[in-house]
Image: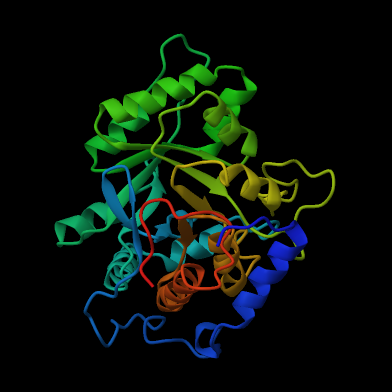
Amino acid sequence: MIRNLSRRQFVKSSLLASAALPLSLRAKAEPTAAAAGAAPANSERVELPKGRIGNLEFSRLMMGGNLIAGWAHSRDLQYVSTLMRRYNTPQKIRETLELGEQHGITAINTWVMDDNSQIFEHWKNGGKMQWVSQVRLPDISASATDYSQIDKAIEQGAVAVHLTGDTAERILDDAKFDKLASAVQYIRSRKRVAGVAAHDLRVIVECEKRKFDVDFYQKTFHPSDYFTGPKPGDPDRVAKNDNSWCSDPQAVIDVFSRINKPWIAFKILAAGAVPPRAGFPFAVNGGADFILVGMFDWQVDDNVKLAQRVFRVASGAGSKRTRPWHGGAVAT
């Protein structure tokens, strides 16, 4: 059932739904076998709900690349990025990719200019994880648009390509939005699924206003009632302490309720400030068709179990979801 909810009602219903999850899906004090680096006892692939974007099928839970690449939104903790890079050795990255694939995750999203060599090694060893590549347009002030990152992503094997949020927002601020449209068309001309990401909701609104021919949107989405959440006067994109990316989740819900394209929600845990048992149902009930989550190897098993439960509840009788599914119905 699709119905309008106030922001207060939506947050309350999402948190109540998360509280009803089994204790086995909540944080555990003891590390799992996967956390210790061991392969899961059952090496058969786990099934996650899937959906279509363009002509491709993806698991509705996708793997983010920030934790693997060491891009930590760690507020004023200066050591976290180094710690992440030390932990995620090449071997550990490959283990994480393999573990994700065994658990039914079929896609990972990373920036094309990061070191993606372990994805390529994963493919050489028979891995099937699909790569969704983030790209930027290096110099939007030039008369000719630089598509070098798009070309690199396609040449290296990306099946889908999207413009990053900071790129789209810079183009919007500089009143050069036609360059974004041209970049999307270029991606599509190269026979790849094309998308636009945004932290700032104005980007999505402008794309829809101009009727951009995009295959999907990727938008930040998370609740705001956590300790370091957005405060009145904080900018809409990233607050001054780098701790929020979605200052008005109800506005995001309202805008996407009128959009008939697949939506991948990212930053759904506000870089670790929101627990998965709250962030997952909030994003899915709020209308996201896919959720993009950065995860360490020891988080994969719990995240997949939680995602299975959340998608099942959100597609069943009594669902709190505010938007129809895009990319196909979710099997209950």
Say which of 82 and 32 sits in front. Answer: 32
Say which of 159 and 157 sits in front. Answer: 159
* Residue 226 located left or right of residue 92: right
Q: Quadrant of the N terminus?
A: bottom right
Residue 74: in sight, yes or no? Answer: yes
Residue 186 locus on image (x, y percent):
33, 24
Residue 49 locus on image (x, y percent):
35, 66
Colour scheme used in the picture? rainbow
Up-down relation of residue 2 to residue 147 (above or below): below
For the point 37% across and 87% down, the residue is: 33
For the point 49% across and 38% down, the residue is: 164
Residue 65 lies in quadrant: bottom left
Residue 228: in sight, yes or no? Answer: no
Residue 225 lies in quadrant: bottom right
For the point 28% across and 67% down, the residue is: 101
Up-down relation of residue 218 to residue 292 (above or below): above
Q: In which quarter of the image is the C terminus?
A: bottom left
Say which of 92 and 178 sits in front. Answer: 178
* Residue 14 located left or right of residue 211: right
Label count reads 0
Say which of 110 and 13 sits in front. Answer: 13
Residue 196 locus on image (x, y percent):
47, 36
* Residue 33 located left or right of residue 311: left
Residue 253 locus on image (x, y percent):
63, 50
